[in-house]
Image (cartoon, rainbow, N blue to C red):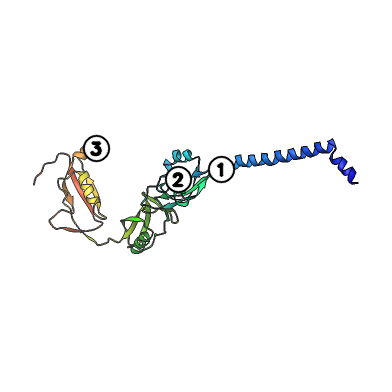
C-alpha cells in the first residue's frame, strides 16, 4: 500500500497537479494582497489640515491639494462669525491628534450660520404688553402702529412682516422686525387745531393726516386741472383756526382753496 502511494507521489501526473495547486495558491494570495493594497491605499500617510476658522467657500483648492473631501454635517447659529466659518472638524488636524489618513478620506465639519429660525406666535387679540414680552423672549424686533378701535383698545389687531400678515407658526429668522397694529380708542381725545391758512392742498392734507384720526376735506372751485390743484392755496378752514383752539379727534377739517391766492394777513 505504501509502495503504491509513494509511486503515485513520484509520478509525473501527481507532480504536475501539485505544482499547479501551488502556483494557483501563490497567484491568488499575492494577487488578492496586491488588489487590497491598491484599493486601500496601503502605506499612504496624508496629513489632516487644520480647517477650523476657515470658510467652507474657500476650501476647494486646499482640499484638492490633499486629495481629501469635505462634508458639512450641520450648521450652528453663531452671529459672531462670518456665515460658513468652520467651527469643528472630524478627524482633528494631524498637528493636534497625530492621526493621518489616506487619499479620498472625507473630513466632516460643522459650520456657522448667522440666522436662526424662530416660530412666529399668534398675537392677535392679545394685549400690547403681552405681545411685546413674547416678541422680546423670542428675540424678534418690533415696532408699534396704532389704529382707531373702541372694541380692541390696547389689543393687537394685526401682526405684519414686511407689510403683510404673518401667520402663527411661520418660521422667521431671529431678529426679524414685526409690526404690531394695536387698537386705540381715541374717542374724545383732544387735539390742537392746526393752522392751514396759506398752505397748498397737498401740504394741508399731509399735516392733517399726521394727526391721529383726523379727517380732511378740500374744496377749490377755481381748480380746473390737476396743476391748478397743486398751486392752489387755502384761504379759509372749518373749524376756524384760533390760537390754542382744541378739537376732538375724529373731527373733519374742511378747507377752501383758491388758485389765485393773495395773502391778506
Q: Along the line of sight, which residue is nearer the eye, 189 or 219?
A: 189
Report x, y in % for residue 174: 39, 54
Residue 68 placement, left or right of 146: right
Secondary structure of the residue carrying numbered label 2: loop
**Res 146 quadrant in image:** bottom left
Residue on which the image places disc 3: 226
Q: Earlier in the sequence, mark 1 or mark 3?
A: 1
Of circles 1 and 2, which is in front? Answer: 1
First in sequence: mark 2 or mark 3?
Answer: 2
Question: 114 or 179: which is nearer to us?
Answer: 114
Residue count near mark 2 (Cα–Cα under 10 Å), binned few <14, some 14–19, many ≥20: some
Seen at 90% across and 43% down, the residue is: 4
Q: Determine the secondary structure under disc 3.
A: helix
Q: Is residue 151 visible?
A: no
For the residues marked 1 and 2, what is the alpha-carbon distance in whole angstroms?
19 Å
Disc 1 and disc 2 in contact, CB within 8 angstroms: no
Residue 115 higher or lower than 32, as above or below = below
Residue 221 placed where, x, y %? 20, 41
Chain-order first, disc 1 or disc 2: 1
Residue beneath disc 1 = 43
Q: Tell whether 237 sits left or right of 90.
A: left
What is the number of the mark on residue 49?
2
Looking at this view, is 128 or 148 the one in front?
128
Say what secondary structure mark 1 lies in.
Answer: loop
Label of residue 233 in the image: none
Distance between the Cα atoms at labels 2 and 3?
72 Å
> Badge 3: how crowded within 10 Å, few (<14), some, or many (20+)?
few
Other-residue count near label 1 (Cα within 10 Å), few / some / many at <14 / 14–19 / ≥20: few
Measuring from the top left, give residue 6's x and y in whole percent.
86, 43
- Count of all numbered marks drawn on residues in the image: 3
Distance Cα–Cα, label 1 vs label 3 = 88 Å
Amino acid at each position: 500500500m505504501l509502495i503504491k502511494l509513494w509511486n503515485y507521489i513520484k509520478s509525473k501526473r501527481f507532480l504536475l497537479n501539485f505544482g499547479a495547486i501551488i502556483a494557483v495558491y501563490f497567484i491568488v494570495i499575492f494577487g488578492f494582497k496586491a488588489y487590497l493594497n491598491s484599493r486601500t491605499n496601503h502605506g499612504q500617510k496624508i496629513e489632516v489640515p487644520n480647517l477650523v476658522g476657515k470658510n467652507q467657500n474657500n476650501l476647494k483648492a486646499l482640499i484638492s491639494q490633499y486629495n481629501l473631501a469635505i462634508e458639512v454635517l450641520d450648521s450652528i447659529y453663531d452671529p459672531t462669525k462670518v456665515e460658513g466659518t468652520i467651527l469643528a472638524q472630524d478627524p482633528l488636524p494631524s498637528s493636534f491628534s497625530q492621526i493621518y489618513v489616506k487619499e479620498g478620506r472625507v473630513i466632516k465639519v460643522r459650520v456657522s450660520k448667522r440666522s436662526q429660525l424662530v416660530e412666529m406666535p399668534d398675537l392677535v387679540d392679545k394685549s400690547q404688553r403681552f405681545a411685546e414680552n413674547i416678541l422680546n423672549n423670542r428675540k424678534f424686533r418690533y415696532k408699534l402702529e396704532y389704529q382707531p378701535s373702541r372694541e380692541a383698545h390696547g389689543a393687537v389687531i394685526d401682526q405684519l412682516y414686511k407689510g403683510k400678515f404673518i401667520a402663527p407658526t411661520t418660521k422667521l429668522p431671529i431678529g426679524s422686525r414685526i409690526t404690531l397694529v394695536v387698537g386705540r380708542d381715541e374717542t374724545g381725545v383732544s387735539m390742537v387745531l392746526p393752522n392751514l391758512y396759506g398752505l397748498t392742498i397737498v401740504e394741508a392734507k399731509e399735516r392733517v393726516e399726521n394727526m391721529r384720526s383726523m379727517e380732511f376735506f378740500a374744496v377749490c372751485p377755481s381748480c380746473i386741472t390737476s396743476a391748478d390743484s397743486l398751486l392752489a392755496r387755502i384761504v379759509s378752514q372749518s373749524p376756524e383756526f384760533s390760537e390754542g383752539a382744541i378739537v376732538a379727534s375724529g373731527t373733519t377739517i374742511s378747507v377752501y382753496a383758491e388758485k389765485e391766492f393773495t395773502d391778506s394777513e
